[in-house]
Amino acid sequence: MSWLASVVLGLVQGLTEFLPVSSSAHLRLTAAFAGWHDPGAAFTAVTQIGTEAAVLIFFRKDIARIVSAWARSLADRSMQADHDARTGWLVIVGSLPIGVLGVTLKDQIEGPFRDLRLIAATLVVMGVVLGVADRLAARDERGGRHRAVRARKDLRDLGVRDGLVYGCCQALALVPGVSRSGATISGGLLMGYTRESAARYSFLLAMPAVLASGVYELKDAGGGHVAWGPTLLATLIAFASGYAVIAWFMRFISSRSFMPFVVYRIALGVALFFLVSTDTLSPHAGESAA
């Protein structure tokens, strides 16, 4: 991988990781359109450490409070009823599905799942799902002539069932094009959570899985799959741009809907289908020999 490619791909990773548009799909597409080799799942996982470091810093107060309460709940059973301690346990429970499936489907994730036709399909399908979920949330918030405004849930309402559903939604993001944040936010909205609560929990839930995946893939960084120098640079760029996107995104969703992202996903998916179907772009364009 060239240094220029690492700069571009690091920026793409940081700009798209926290938006419901799929960072893995955009990394794959950027490489295909630029004529570069597919950076691969290992590169994606390692650079995600940079974006998750941005989450750790941005939500540092929340994370410190949750970790502290969770640790105390190990020795003090009465703490298990505490909201922060319960959130810590639910993040662990919600991380199990993606952990199990990530190991089980490793070969598919690094191979067939990176086909551009599949990415186009997941962009469109999950765009529609996010659009439906967003409309339901808007309907509850606005009410109507014959409907009263309906209160939506926040993270204090989170239980084991919802925690597992969040985790299963996150596991769908193993397929490029689905989007980790898009899947978990959609799941949260469909379960009746507010936009802000769904987004906040999406970021918290992603940390264990993404950090574990990045550490696991570090073994490939020096083995020919990922070069250390360019990958480190891309990770630093992903951290800086990712932090800026988190700050913007949390402000954006406090007063705006997800419909711009829905339109973007569907338009990109349809355009990709067209390019592949007309042989303008090969479904395997830019695939790495590795």
Image (spheres, helix red, strand yellow):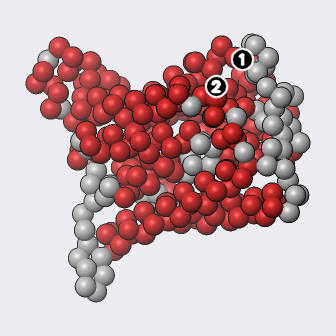
Name above or below for residue 106 compared with residue 154.
Answer: above
Q: Is residue 18 left or right of residue 42?
A: left
Residue at the spot of label 2: 46
Task: State the residue lying farthest toward the left.
Answer: 78
First in residue order: circle 2 vs circle 1: 2
Residue 175, visible in the rendered structure: yes
Distance Cα–Cα, label 2 vs label 1: 8 Å
Q: Which residue is more in the foreground, 114 or 43?
A: 114
Q: As shown in the figure, which amino acid type bears the numbered disc 2?
A: Val
Q: Which residue is more in the foreground, 117 or 160?
A: 117
Residue 218 at x, y percent in the picture: 64, 17
Which SS class for mark 2? helix
Which image quadrant is residue 200 in?
top left
Residue 140 at x, y percent in the picture: 31, 69
- Mark drawn on residue 167: none
Q: Which residue is more in the foreground, 209 or 149?
A: 209
Which image quadrant is residue 144 in?
bottom left
Q: Which residue is more in the foreground, 110 or 37?
A: 110
Residue 224 at x, y percent in the picture: 79, 17
Residue 164 at x, y percent in the picture: 33, 40
Sort mark 1 into few (<14), some (14-19) or many (20+) by Cα contacts within 10 Å. some
Circles 2 and 1: CB distance less than 8 Å? yes
Q: Is residue 135 left or right of residue 53?
A: left
Name above or below for residue 130 compared with residue 18.
Answer: below
Q: Residue at x 65, y 41 (%)?
A: 113
Classify the position of the N terminus by image quarter.
Answer: top right
Q: Residue at x 56, y 38 (%)?
A: 174
Q: As shown in the figure, which amino acid type bears the numbered disc 1?
A: Ala
- Mark drawn on residue 221: 1
Q: Is residue 14 left or right of residue 18?
A: right
